[in-house]
Every structure is written in structure tokens, then in C-alpha cells.
Amino acid sequence: MRGGVRSTSFKAGTSGNPSGRPRNAATVEARKTFVDVRISAQEHTLNAIHTLATIMNDSNASKQARIAAAQALLDRGHGRPSPPVEGPIALYDLTRLSDAELETLDRILARATPPTLLLEGQTAD
């Protein structure tokens, strides 16, 4: 009987499995191992940064090694750059707008821009 009330139906608002999915011992052990490896790696952070800085500043190191070390330091210190945004804005010819229309668009975009993306001195008012 589809969609009807059966003796095995659960009451509304009551979980059929209140304790959740049973844990697989292998999965739990793998997660513990992953955490242990991550903690161990974090203990070497300062040494790794020092090594990268040493390679970056070593004039005898290959250019590839120096660039890779510099890139790794920048990525860790500032995060990886976001990929360029390509979207419908590139399809518009903004040169056809009047100064007043451009000012209106600027005000709209300023209000729609998240605060973290505002340039220094800009406000989202």
C-alpha cells in the first residue's frame, strides 16, 4: 500500500534512526589517522616556511625552485588568487551609457558588493 499508513510508519517529527548512521570502525580509524597526520604536519610549519624562504633566497637554486618556493609562500600567506570572473558583464558596452547612468550603475554595484570587496575609501551606502 503506497502512501498509506502502515504499522511501520514513524510518527511525524520522530526519526526512524535517532542515533544516526552506525559508525564503521575502519572509517573512524582512518579519520583519526588523518587528524594525526595533519597535526604532525602542522608541527613542522615554521621549519617548512623557513626552508621555502631559504630556497627562494638561494641564488644557486634553480629559477624553477625559487619561483615554486616563492609561490608556495605567497599562497600560504595570502591565499591563492581567485580565478578571473567571466560573466555577462563582459557582454555589455558600458561606453554607450551616459555619465548619469554610469553613476547610477556605480551606486547600485557599490551597494551590491560585499564589504570585503570594497576598495579602500569606498563605502556601500
Image: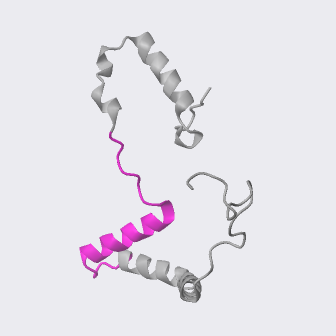
Magenta residues, start to end:
57-86
Q: Which percent across, then down, holds residue 1?
A: 57, 56
- With respect to residue 4, does 61 lie above or below? below
Screen quadrant of the C terminus:
top right
Residue at figure coordinates x 32%, y 40% from the top left:
86
Is residue 16 located in the magenta-colored stretch of the structure? no
Q: Which quadrant holds residue 111? A: top right
Q: Which percent across, then down, holds residue 53?
A: 43, 76
Residue at figure coordinates x 34%, y 37% from the top left:
87
Q: Which percent across, then down, holds residue 68?
A: 33, 72
Query: Across the whole image, how many numbered discs are drawn on residues?
Result: 0
- With respect to residue 83, does 56 lie above or below? below
Residue at figure coordinates x 71%, y 61% from the top left:
10
Taking depth in this image into account, of 85 and 54 the one nearest to the observer is 85
Is residue 61 located in the magenta-colored stretch of the structure? yes
- With respect to residue 91, does 66 lie above or below? below
